[in-house]
Amino acid sequence: MKLLQFTLLLAHEDWVYTKGWIVTIAGFLIVILALAILSMIFSGVASYFKKKDAKKNEVKELKPATVKPVTKLAEGEIPAEVQAAIGMALYLTTNLHDEESNVITIERRQTSWNDKNYGVRHWKR
């Protein structure tokens, strides 16, 4: 009887051992399959963005510039573009802006967070 029980125990251990290998191989295959799927997804996303960037960087044909009809100005009138150029030149040459005193006028607010009376150096005795 004891020999039969020992034989059944050995057979059961082999089955558990076989189950362990099946689980190990199945887990390994699942991980490899998941990695393969992820690599395909990432390579697809990368190629999508490369195509998108290639479309963005394409050189587009330039259309010939259209010539605006010249409007006749009254005598003594200056065109708006010339006025803008003169204004910008004057601004850049004179550097019209207020000069700073370079003095910082921010004062620290006194709160209990920065009060020296509450510091850790003053222990109550």
Image (cartoon, rainbow, N blue to C red):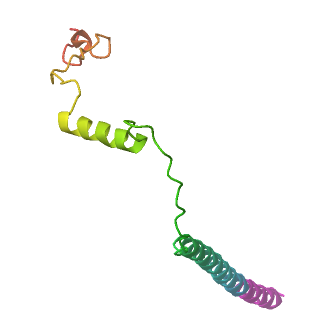
The C terminus appears in which quarter of the rendering? top left
Left or right: where 66 falls relative to 3 = left
Residue at screen point 84% across, 88% down: 1
The boundaries of the magenta stretch are: 1-19
From the top left corner, tell me how far across and down residue 45 is, in percent: 62, 73
72 within the magenta span: no
Residue 83 lies, in percent from the top left, at 36, 38
Rendering quarter of residue 5: bottom right
Q: How many marks?
A: 0
**Residue occupying the far front of the picture:** 75
Does the magenta-highlighted stretch encompass residue 13? Answer: yes
What percent of the width, then of the height, locates residue 119? 24, 16
Q: What secondary structure prevails in the magenta region? A: helix
User: Observer-nearest residue: 37 or 90?
Assistant: 90
Give above or below for 123 relative to 76.
above
Q: Nearer the viewer, residue 64 or 45?
A: 64
Residue 80: image location, x then y, percent: 42, 40
> Which is nearer the eye, 78 or 44?
78
Residue at 53% x, 70% y is 64
Using residue 74 as the reference point, say whether residue 5 is left or right of it.
right
Of residue 99 and residue 39, the one placed in the foreground of this image is 99
